Amino acid sequence: MLGRLMKYEWKATWKLLAPANLLIVVTSFFAWLTWRCMRYDGYDMSNAAVNLAAGILLVTYFLSMFVVIVGSAIYLIWRFYTSTYGDQGYLLHTLPVDKHHIIIAKVLVSTAWILLSIFLMYLSLFLVVGSTMEEFGTVFQEILKIVVTQSYGDTGSAFVVVMGIITMIVGMLARVLKVTAAISLGQLSSNHKLLTAFGFYYAIYIVQQIIGAIYGVVVSYFTYRAGDGALGMMWEFNLITGLVYMVVFYALTWYVMEKRLNLD
């Protein structure tokens, strides 16, 4: 049943999100071509019309990525709300389907779409900044080196890649589940369900910020007492809290959907 739910969710979101991600690919090609031409020795910097056209293409490129990332997130949030607690929810919850399967299917598909958009965005930026494969490799290595040094110190590269991917996926799952939990908690209100959901979301966000600030203060104190000026690596904290948040947000979503469901 989980496979059928995921297949249905893919079909329901494919028609909009696939063309949206394709837009990133298309605009990336034109941005890469524009950037390559601007770096060509024969490029006429004094031609106002050409500069204007190049500027418009590059601005369109960056705006398209922003619109796709933000728009996809908003669409997925709206889809979860309408298909779970909106008019479509009446049909969904009458099916002989376990609530766990509903949550897992929607969260996995939403997370996959978001990760795909983010991957295409970063890949696009790497390709546009490095207009040749040699430059692309240099840019990628330098950025990776900076990220690795700041997040993992001198840890081995294989470990860095594995833990980085795991931490990123866990973090994204936790963010998606935070949205589902906030929307679900909003249904506990008899009126103004969406407004209540926004309130729960920002309340959760504030609590997370407080927890992160407390951790930063504690780590700073002990590293200072130890004579080490570095704050310490944050990836362990991000991974552990991500896992904890996943469990908490999942439990809240399931509880409302299973025990306190109210579609009135």
Image (tube, rainbow, N blue to C red):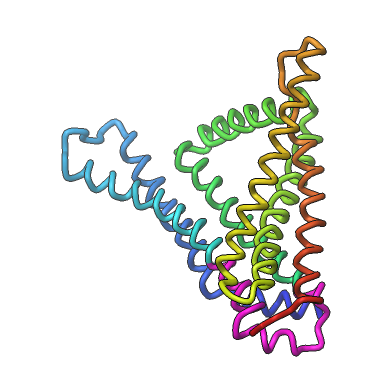
Q: Is residue 203 magenta?
A: no
Q: Give the magenta part as a residue range.
A: 75-102
Is 200 situated above or below 170? below
**Figure quadrant of the N terminus:** bottom right
Q: Residue at x 80, y 28 (%)?
A: 156
- State which quadrant residue 194 falls in: bottom right
Q: Residue at x 53, y 68 (%)?
A: 75
* Residue 207 x/y as whole percent: 69, 46
Q: Main secondary structure of the magenta part?
A: helix
**The residue positioned farthest toward the top in the image shown:** 227
Give the tally of numbered discs: 0
Task: Judge from the rendering whether residue 49 lies leftward or rightward of residue 16; answer left or right.
Answer: left
- Magenta includes 85? yes
> Where's the C terminus, which quadrant?
bottom right
Whether 74 is drawn above or below 174: the answer is below
Residue 193, percent from left and from top: 59, 71
Give the residue displayed 72% in from the left and 51% down from the top.
169
Direction from residue 246 to residue 206 in the image, left or right: left
194 vs 127: above or below? below
Apparent side of residue 231 relative to residue 40 in the rendered image (left or right): right
At horizontal 66% and vertical 83% (from top left) the residue drawn is 263
